[in-house]
Amino acid sequence: MLKAWHRLARENELLYLFLNNRVAQLAALIALLTVGGAALSPVLSPTDPYDIASIDIMDSLVPPVWSDGSDERFFIGTDDQGRDLLSAILYGTRLSLFVGFLSITFASVLGVSVGLMAGYFGGRFDAFVMRIADVQLSLPAILTALLIDGIARGILPREQHDSLMIVVLTFAIGLSLWVNFARTARASTFVERNKEYVQACEIMGMHPVRILLVHILPNIMGPILVILTVDLAVAVLLEATLSFLGVGVPPNQPSLGTLIRIGTEYMFSGEWWIVIFPSAMLITMIVSINVLGDFLRDAFNPRLR
Amino acid sequence: MTSLLNIVDLCVKFPTRFGEFTALNHVNLDVSAGEIHGLVGESGAGKSTVGAAIMGLLQSPGYVSDGEINFMGDNLTALSDDAYHKLRGQRISMIFQDPQTSLNPLLTVANQLIETIRQHADMSHNDARKRAVELLEVTGLQDVENRIDEYPHQFSGGMRQRVVIALALCTNPELIIADEPTTALDVSVQKQILELIRNLCTERNIGIILITHDIGVINEITDRVTVLRSGRVIETGDTATVLGEPEDDYTRALMAAVPRLDKRLHRFKNIVSDDEFSAEDASWRIDDASADYASEWLLEQRALQQSKTSNHKSESQLLEVPQISGTSRAPIASLSDGKPRNIEPRNIEPNNSKPNNSKPKNSKPRQAILSVSELAVTFYSGQPSWFGKKEGFKALSDISFHMQPGTVLGVVGESGSGKSTLAKAIVGLVDPSAGNMTFRSETLPPGSARTRSHPVRRQIQMVFQDPYSSLNNRKTVEGIISEPIEFYGLATNKQEIRKLVASVLDLVEMPQRAMLKYPHQFSGGQRQRIAVARALVARPEFLICDEPTSALDVSIQAQMLNLLKDLQEAFGLSILFISHNLAVIRQMADNVVVLRNGRLIEAAETEQFFSSPADPYSQMLLRETPSLRFLQAPI
């Protein structure tokens, strides 16, 4: 078993580089902890912030345990509604990551399919789609997300806002991030389609969809994987920003963005913990994911090594 | 003559995570002024590492672990970086392989030369410019005064290489290292550049180290030669002696692997190969899978096809069918006994049109397998203008030829002659703008009109030039080879497909265990075998080989050519063999077609073409190809 592991580590370039990169290992550990903590939030957190019955307004704005006037039930204090901040952060991270993963999946499926087709077929389809991408790229992603979010809010009936908000957020963030995937996929497909193994498939008379999915897609996964990691951080950040601006998740559901927004209101009146802890969580998570993304980019690009 | 450069026991090592790799192992080399010293070897032999070590430009983390490089009395290995920097360019300079990349495309030729001259000599801009003009004139560039202010892209490949040589001469070096200086050039230009190097060497008394894999080039211009193999010197001495009467087995084998221009050999013998398989690889087998099984499977289909097609023809042909399958058994049995597996050439195939085939059928004039008439291909670049006719680049025009079944047609031409475009037009990757193609009496529709399920999609298969891009790196070899079988529905049973894949690998002389691996685990030659296997399992009748060996070393090339010959003879394949190398064509082809700038210059039978080419261009090609003509030694 150990021998097999050693052989794998020697033959697999990616694994080898990872095992020799302390920063990437640390980042992976932190990312794993945050994702794990978020996924296990119902088990780990002391209270359930969704359970209104357990929340007592009398417990609001309790400071962390090491400060005066603290309550040992709330390790890092409570927010203005009396929710346990630790539980809220864990649940909030889960929601943020959930929205992040969902929107990045949507963005990558859309972007990669468009990019594959544009790169393979070229011509008018390519020109048309890539001009749209160019236009969208000239707008900041947050603006696109706000725009889509706003339109969705306008169209949807008011009473369904809260229940559909997650879906709307996913679409808004996904649609503002697909461009990166499309451009990367297109550029890589352009390189691959002129390789002889693709010509061999074309000579056989293979259907283009099969060529794209079975032959080209696996060969362009490297750069896509890099974008996937880097953009996951962007998606989580976008969600937090939208929630911070009050157009994200409904206020009764804790997300890192909403917690930070609540925190800013109390920042100058001495209740610092409400803004500091969620922000620290967000920053740690984003940095660790970004470091991992950078590691992957370097690993897949031999010229940068 | 005093020696200019004297390398003693040079060892170069590259630490890797798999341990230290010894790139050069006690190499000795001696170069005198006014001498061209050839360094020859196959890829990985360490030729370029020698050059880099002399220049002090070993790629990190490589280092000189032992030995001395004595250049006119100085030991270069002990030199400081600063001193080395002064020496480099000033006294030792270099000519690179690819003139496309060794010149800066953003600077004019004049600026590049002037920059180099002024770097090393205290000279005014105008003086430097005068010197640049002189140098370019020395290298034989025409109309220098006008052209010196142009950019590299405005020059042709050969002219660019002259500029590179002028750059190397800027500082009156005593030693020039030329790393594959003519590999990227066409034969006619190659000859001129080699002559230029020769003249510079004698006129200026410069020592030149010429690194190349091409024994023809070595033979043409070097005085002495050193043969390298895996970082060791195998043999060194006068070129005529080493090449004419090689002492070492490896040199002899290397010489034997070089395709000869003067006569056709039945097959290459006595080939050495560095590709070795582990015992684990060799012992892993799939039950009942063997080369015999593969050839039986491939031949069985041919017999079926024969019966199908002949149903509509004559009864006499129909009667022949059982006879074919009967005779096909004999050679199959002999396939796997003893010695290096190879398919004994037999006339099993009724389609075989070799002159010694005594079947009466051959006396009848038979219908061509592929006819091309007045074929033209035009490429349009960018947007055509709104008015008037579109003007395009004529890649091919007015090409007509016929190919008999079971023969090999060699297509020769320099770069840009349209060889590959011809292949692409036939397989349907490129649409012809005019002309007809007929495959076995049926019209071959152009690519865009050819349906996905058209039978020729299976009947015509292709082997590509670059084995590094012709296989999908993300698939196992099993996946790569089984794809055509599944795609064309040639077999459906999973077990059967696995067995076929293993058998075909056996047939192309690869271990069966190769099917579990990925392409990157194989060398270029092995990958090319896998590519051939992929083409074969489609049970094609017609194979297009587009420069199948030009990316390979000579000994691997010889193995590959042997394999292709064996397969061609065993299965009666018709092959369209494209190559820029006349010697390879001579070994492979029954008939030859010469292309130049998209036009057909000459079409002739191979023997006739090589003994008396009719067209002046063909004569020139034959004359300029560096060869081993002078060697009388029987190989």
Image (cartoon, rainbow, N blue to C red):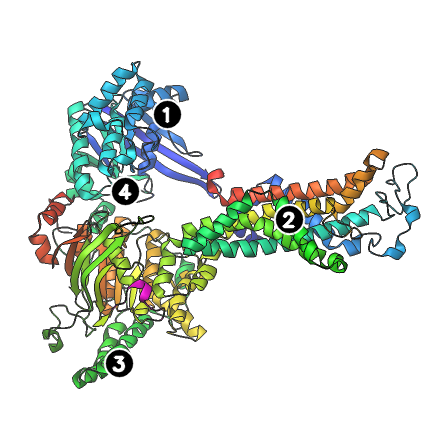
Residue at the disc numbered 1:
B77
Amino acid type of disc 1?
A: Thr
Residue at the disc numbered 3:
B308
Foreground pick, A16 / B394: B394
Residue numbers of the magenta segment: B444-453
Residue at the disc numbered 2:
A147
Amino acid type of disc 3?
A: Lys
Q: CA distance from mark 2 to mark 1?
A: 66 Å
Residue A257 in the image, given as x and y percentages of width and height? 73, 45
Residue at the disc numbered 4:
B41
Q: Chain of mark 4?
A: B
The nearer-to-camera label among 1 and 3 is: 3
Q: CA distance from mark 1 to mark 4?
A: 24 Å
Can residue B316 be seen by looking at this rendering?
Answer: yes
Q: Residue furthest front?
A: B387
Please determine whether, in this image, residue B603 is positioned above or below residue B242: below
Q: Are marks 2 and 1 on the same chain?
A: no
Q: Are marks 1 and 3 on the same chain?
A: yes
In the figure, residue B212 lies in which quadrant?
top left
Q: Going from the N terminus, do you reach mark 1 or mark 3 first? A: 1
Please determine whether, in this image, residue B281 is positioned above or below residue B258: below
Element under label 2?
helix
The reply to whether dot 3 and dot 4 touch (C-beta < 8 Å) is no
Q: Chain of mark 1?
A: B
Secondary structure mainly formed by the magenta segment: loop
The nearer-to-camera label among 4 and 2 is: 2
Foreground pick, B430 / B85: B430
Q: Is residue B290 magenta?
A: no
Q: Going from the N terminus, do you reach mark 3 or mark 4 first? A: 4
The nearer-to-camera label among 2 and 1 is: 2
Q: Are marks 4 and 2 on the same chain?
A: no
The reply to whether dot 1 and dot 3 touch (C-beta < 8 Å) is no
